[in-house]
């Protein structure tokens, strides 16, 4: 029982220390002339594999209090750039139902390597552009057995 209480306390402290931020490999950049907003980008499923349906998460929060910023689906844009740098695709972002400040775009990556995610647009009157890079995307075949 004591171990369970200690484990639950550790999880609670970790969540509090992160301020409710995602715990997976999402990356954060501060945007705005005075650093008013946090733009957090990552994938719904991590680690990331090729030939597996996934989604890009774009999360926007106010930097001062970590509160979510809603209703940006018409002013945020996402471009996915393949590891070769030549193949590019703009992906439509949509708001996630029941998750304020969360925007998502479905994707199925087909090449292993490091992808670039370019996010730009407006957060109210703040215009921004930011780039993020994935961890190495591995081929799904590496998980197959036998």
Image (spheres, rainbow, N blue to C red):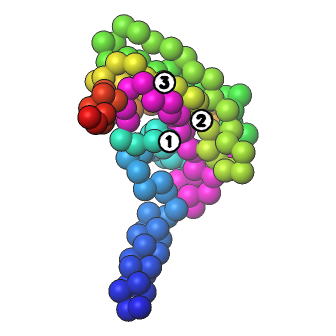
**Quarter of the image with the N terminus in it:** bottom left
Where in the figure is residue 87, as x and y percent of width and height? 41, 9
Residue 63 rendering spot, x and y as whole percentages: 53, 53
Name the residue tied to disc 3: 108
Q: Quadrant of residue 140?
A: top left
Residue 99 falls within the magenta-colored stretch: no
**Vertical side of 68 occupied by 119: above or below:** above
Q: Of 135 and 34, which appears nearest the observer?
A: 135
Give SS at disc 1: loop
Label 2: how many residues lie within 10 Å, few (<14), some (14-19) or many (20+)? many
Using the numbered discs, state the Cα–Cα distance from disc 2 to disc 3 in whole angstroms: 13 Å
In what quadrant of the picture does the C terminus appear? top left
Q: Indicate which disc residue 104 carries.
A: 2
Can you give x and y, in whole percent of width and height, for residue 6 in the image?
A: 38, 85
N-terminal label among 1 and 3? 1
Q: Which residue: 49% across, 64% down? A: 19
Q: Taking 87 as reference, is 94 above or below it?
A: below
Q: How many marks?
A: 3
Residue displayed at 43% across by 73% down: 11
Locate residue 79, reporting x and y percent.
50, 21
Q: Which segment is the magenta one?
A: 48-70
User: Spatial distance from mark 1 to mark 2, Cα to Cα?
Assistant: 9 Å
Q: Is residue 52 visible?
A: yes
Question: Magenta includes 55?
Answer: yes
Can residue 124 be seen from the camera position used here?
A: no
Asked if the residue under mark 3 is in contact with the one under mark 2, i.e. CB atoms within 8 Å, the reply is no
Q: Residues within 10 Å of mark 3 (few under 14, many from 20)?
A: few
CB within 8 Å, label 1 to label 2: yes
- 77 over 13 or under it: above or below: above
For marks 2 and 3, give the one nearer the viewer: 3
Give 114 or 47, whichever is nearer the viewer: 47
* Mark carried by residue 44: 1
């Amino acid at each position: 029982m004591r171990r369970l209480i200690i484990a639950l306390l550790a999880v609670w402290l970790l969540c509090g220390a992160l301020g409710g931020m995602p715990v997976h490999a999402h990356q954060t950049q501060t945007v705005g002339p005075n650093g008013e907003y946090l733009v957090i980008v990552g994938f719904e499923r991590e680690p990331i594999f090729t030939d597996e349906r996934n989604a890009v998460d774009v999360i926007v929060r106010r930097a001062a209090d970590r509160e979510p910023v809603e209703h940006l689906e018409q002013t945020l844009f996402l471009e996915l750039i393949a590891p070769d740098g030549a193949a590019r695709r703009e992906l439509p972002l949509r708001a996630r139902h029941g998750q304020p400040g969360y925007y998502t775009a479905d994707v199925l990556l087909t090449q292993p390597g490091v992808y670039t995610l370019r996010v730009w647009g407006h957060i109210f009157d703040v215009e921004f552009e930011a780039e993020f890079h994935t961890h190495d995307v591995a081929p799904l075949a590496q998980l197959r057995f036998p």
